[in-house]
Amino acid sequence: MRSERRTLRCTSCGKEFPARVILRVDYGRPEDRDADLTDGSLFTFRCPHCGKDTYANHYLLWVDEGRTVAVCNLTCEEEKNAVDEALSALNSFGRETTLRRRFVQSPARLCEKAQIFSAGLDDRVVEIVKLYLAEEVRRTHPEKTLTDVLFYPDGDGYGVLFQCPDGDLSVRIDKETLAAASAQFRFSQPAPEVVDAAWAISYLTGGKG
Ligand SMILES: [Zn+2]
């Protein structure tokens, strides 16, 4: 793991404290695989003054175990330069042509992408399925406001979480249903670096992809 020392400010007591911020988790390295992207721990820092946890969003690059895809959580556009640098260092490993990239803008989305790719799924299929399911939820629960839609592994299948201010909803998807959905799509172009709901809408309406 690559990390750096930063000074953070506690959101409870307001005092500053030094923290080690993880910048890169490379599952291609066995020693990095203990780093859990799913529990929020890489973005949570304990204040030494008051003992409370402070949440801080920051740049984090995740590379999958087979080093086929790199997902980066960005907090600003300029951080893309750091991705180029990090990946050119990794590419000395000799996998340059196969390393796909994805950019996301929240730790929750980083976690989602890492889980999608770790499960061997295509995130384009997942985004399209999420879009259909969100439409269905809007139709059946018109009183709900969806603030985010997140895919996650769930036992021997998958789930989609619909975050709503007045209570979340979730839908289960079994592996066969997702495989059947996957078979319906042909993606002729290489995937762009941002694959999200906006990408799915443009794919479905414009035939891009
Ligand atoms: Zn504090």
Image (cartoon, rainbow, N blue to C red):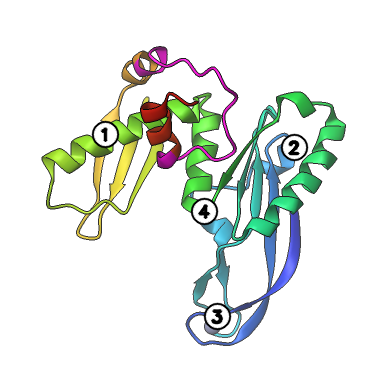
Determine the residue positioned at 57% across, 22% down: 189
- Helix or strand or loop: what does disc 2 sit on? loop
Q: Give me the C-alpha separation between circle 1 and circle 3.
A: 38 Å
Determine the residue positioned at 42% across, 41% down: 198
In the image, what residue type sits under mark 1? Leu
Dominant secondary structure of the magenta stretch? loop
Classed neighbour count for the residue bearing mark 3: other residues with Cα under 10 Å, few (<14), some (14–19), many (≥20): many
Q: Position of residue 6 (x, y in %)?
A: 71, 72
Residue 159 lies left or right of residue 102; in this view the side is left
Residue to which mark 4 is pinned: 107
Q: Give me the C-alpha separation between circle 2 and circle 1.
A: 36 Å
Residue to which mark 1 is pinned: 133
Instruction: Give the magenta part as a residue range.
Output: 181-198
Determine the residue positioned at 60% across, 55% down: 74
Residue to which mark 3 is pinned: 10
| 2 or 4: mark nearer the eye | 4
Residue to which mark 2 is pinned: 29
In the image, what residue type sits under mark 2? Arg
**Residue 192: in magenta span:** yes
Q: Give me the C-alpha separation between circle 3 and circle 2.
A: 32 Å
Mark 2 within 8 Å of ligand 1, using the beta carbon? no
Mark 3 within 8 Å of ligand 1, using the beta carbon? yes
Of label 1 and label 3, which has the lower sequence position? 3
How many marks are shown on the rendered structure?
Answer: 4
